[in-house]
Image: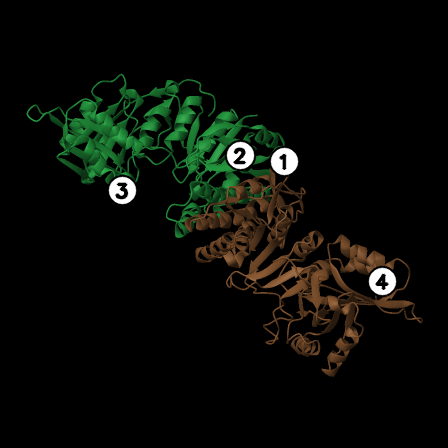
Chain colours: A green, B brown
Amino acid sequence: MSIIVQKFGGTSVADTEKIRNVAHAAILEKELGNDVVVVVSAMGHTTDGLIKLAHELSSHPSEREMDMLMSTGEQVSMSLLAMAIQEQGHDSISLTGAQAGIKTEPAHMCARIIDIDTTRINKHLKEGKIVIVAGFQGICEGNEITTLGRGGSDTTAVALACALKAKRCDIYSDVEAVYTADPRVIKTAQKLKVISYEEMLELARVGANVLHPRSVETAMLNDMPMRVRSSFKLDDVGTLIIGADKMELNKPVTGLACDTSQVRIIICDVQDKPGNAARLFNLLADNNLSVDMIIQSYARKATNTNDIAFTISKNDLDKFNSIKDKINEIVNASNIFVDDDIVKVSVVGAGMIDRPGIAAKMFDTLARENINIKMISTSEIKISCLAEKKYSDAAARALCKAFELDGASVADVKGDLPDV
Amino acid sequence: MSIIVQKFGGTSVADTEKIRNVAHAAILEKELGNDVVVVVSAMGHTTDGLIKLAHELSSHPSEREMDMLMSTGEQVSMSLLAMAIQEQGHDSISLTGAQAGIKTEPAHMCARIIDIDTTRINKHLKEGKIVIVAGFQGICEGNEITTLGRGGSDTTAVALACALKAKRCDIYSDVEAVYTADPRVIKTAQKLKVISYEEMLELARVGANVLHPRSVETAMLNDMPMRVRSSFKLDDVGTLIIGADKMELNKPVTGLACDTSQVRIIICDVQDKPGNAARLFNLLADNNLSVDMIIQSYARKATNTNDIAFTISKNDLDKFNSIKDKINEIVNASNIFVDDDIVKVSVVGAGMIDRPGIAAKMFDTLARENINIKMISTSEIKISCLAEKKYSDAAARALCKAFELDGASVADVKGDLPDV
């Protein structure tokens, strides 16, 4: 018997009516002859409500106590889901992260899973039960409750699927599938039948809010097939995420994404001496500032200085401002300014690896729309350009057309992949 | 260093403002030089809200999943309280029932505590921390979460106090103290400075909603001093509950209570043959019906029948009606009728043991008020009379006057009791 792991996000379990629907989805899979493990997030805005209570009491609540508080959210939704499944005539049991054997490192609010002891889950599956597991949480040494941080429930689901040697991990949310582009902007954007882990990772990083990168990385490392599906359209199989080697690529570009959640920092006239950039980015890393695109200009001979520009998340801007003085001590810049009028437009595709000219075609397409490119960064399967924010939709539409993302299927499963 | 266990009910932690107040109460006790363990219930109406969600999904939700669901309530309030204490500059840690070592029998929704492993609590107390423990919950074999049923948090607090060899267990609620009578009815009712476990038990059973009987029983068995106090008047020491042997009794009656939560069942013309009553009350017990007062009349010679009357809780009336036919099969009665127009008026006092005439005085007092007594039952330290419901307040006022419950102190602590 194959094991299927399903994960349902907060909007899928937002009220008891929706929980009944999730129970139905789990039972459908069970009735197909599979063993079913369901990972759930907290109901709707429960987590936000708990965080609000904590902040009424403390501006910096202890991370250990925050984990105690937040882990209750999933415990509520999982026990309600078990009741709903039982009410529909199937046997079910809910397990906390601790009961499910999810062991993490001893860190609060951002712990990583280090091991899963699947004994208890396997026992309940053998008893014919649909097993519900709390997402987002685990237990560390000393019987302490930990949480996994953002995207934690996706990570729980994929890690469980790998540990249980499941056939597939289905991530259900209010998103029906992965699209070639944001369907709210590009009306002709196409649902992707299949996408590779690598492409999904690039799309996840550039702002397609479908899956958390950590879960995709874990799936990729373990070659675990994932499906992105809608909990409100159970007959739709959504998008399959597998290794690029198992895919038939018809087009060089699989998808595109626009990200307006970043700001650009420009540091002018940095003294061009060895180690300056290293010191700068070490300081940023020490302060937990994730940097995305980085560009350093050629040194100006006259002044022996250059400009360094990079992008960070808007959410990190306060943190950045608090260390601005330290940065100036290091780099002695003539000016540091922040540009928040930017959009990062990216095209992603495993097919671009052996097809030259994709970058040129992207720049050309943007130029024809009179969109000025502020920064460029590339990886093997991705090209990102920074532009003025107002061009976001126009850029997306033009690139979608240029790379044929609004037409027929971009990729398909190669050969006889087992039924996933 | 002495250990003080404090327990705060749902109304005391109903919002973050009140939680801050509880944090203050815990810190006050800590600053008196004591080690402090705080047991909390779920915030305000949280438990009711969770039960409502469960019943939206199932008319008979699984008890195991109900425990998973309900145990989150205390986990929320305890972590918030730990944050509030930390914010006020004291070290604190919250522990679930499982983390606090509270082991119960393997039963759901009504488990009894069988053992408390205090290792972890003692460790944190030694570190100088104020330890917060979730009330109402424990863990049983197989790492399963259990809850203790009604009054569970009071029981957790007293059981912890006993296991930790605490100096005292303080039960904080919205009630300031134990009174000689209900102060909402008898304006001159007096706060009791001290009351014995036995008297408190009788008062608790007859409807003074201050403490759950199970917690008082546990305290009595372990000779653990308790205090009933108000979380909104921290400078008031409330009522001390200790062994009767440590009390100086000034008056035979300590308190009175009126209970309108019962109904009287009268079974007419039961055949007077051996074993009939036993079969009847066994049937009631098998159906989990707790019977309070019981009266069997003398057998009528002509018919060789008698009448049996007893009282049960109003909440159990549906359950009783569902077994009415079975009762008739057993006793073959001429009639079974239900009288819900009753009040049970009780006077309680350890001092009545060696003072005759208390019952006579009670009946006489009621007679002077023209109150007809429907049933009578007595214990060593209690006399209860059933009357028509409309006489509830008049009976209370007259008895209060007759037994001097509205004047000076009823009892005091004998000799040099250590500072509790």
Q: Share a chain, discs 1 and 3?
A: no
User: In this rendering, does residue B32 appear at all?
Assistant: yes
The answer to whether residue A394 is above or below residue B211 is above
Q: Mark 1 highlights which residue?
A: B142
Q: Nearer the viewer, mark 2 or mark 1?
A: 2
Left or right: A243 as drawn, with respect to A25: left
Q: Share a chain, discs 2 and 4?
A: no
Q: Chain of mark 2?
A: A
The percent coordinates of residue A198 (x first, y second) are 34, 24
Left or right: B134 as drawn, with respect to A42: right
Residue located farthest toward the top when viewing the structure as drawn: A354
| Badge 1: residue crowd in 10 Å (few <14, some 14–19, many ≥20) | few
| Badge 2: residue crowd in 10 Å (few <14, some 14–19, many ≥20) | few
| Badge 4: residue crowd in 10 Å (few <14, some 14–19, many ≥20) | some
Q: Chain of mark 3?
A: A
Q: Nearer the viewer, mark 4 or mark 1?
A: 1
Q: Nearer the viewer, mark 2 or mark 4?
A: 2
Q: Nearer the viewer, mark 3 or mark 4?
A: 3
Mark 1 to mark 3: distance in Å? Answer: 47 Å
Residue A282 is labelled as none
Of A86 and A45, the residue lying toward us: A45
Residue at 63% from the left image edge and 59% from the top image edge: B211
Residue B145's quadrant in the figure?
Answer: top right
Q: Mark 3 highlights which residue?
A: A318
Q: Chain of mark 4?
A: B
Q: Share a chain, discs 4 and 1?
A: yes
Q: Nearer the viewer, mark 1 or mark 3?
A: 3
Residue B332 is labelled as 4
Amino acid bearing label 3? Asp
Of A122 and B158, the residue lying toward us: B158
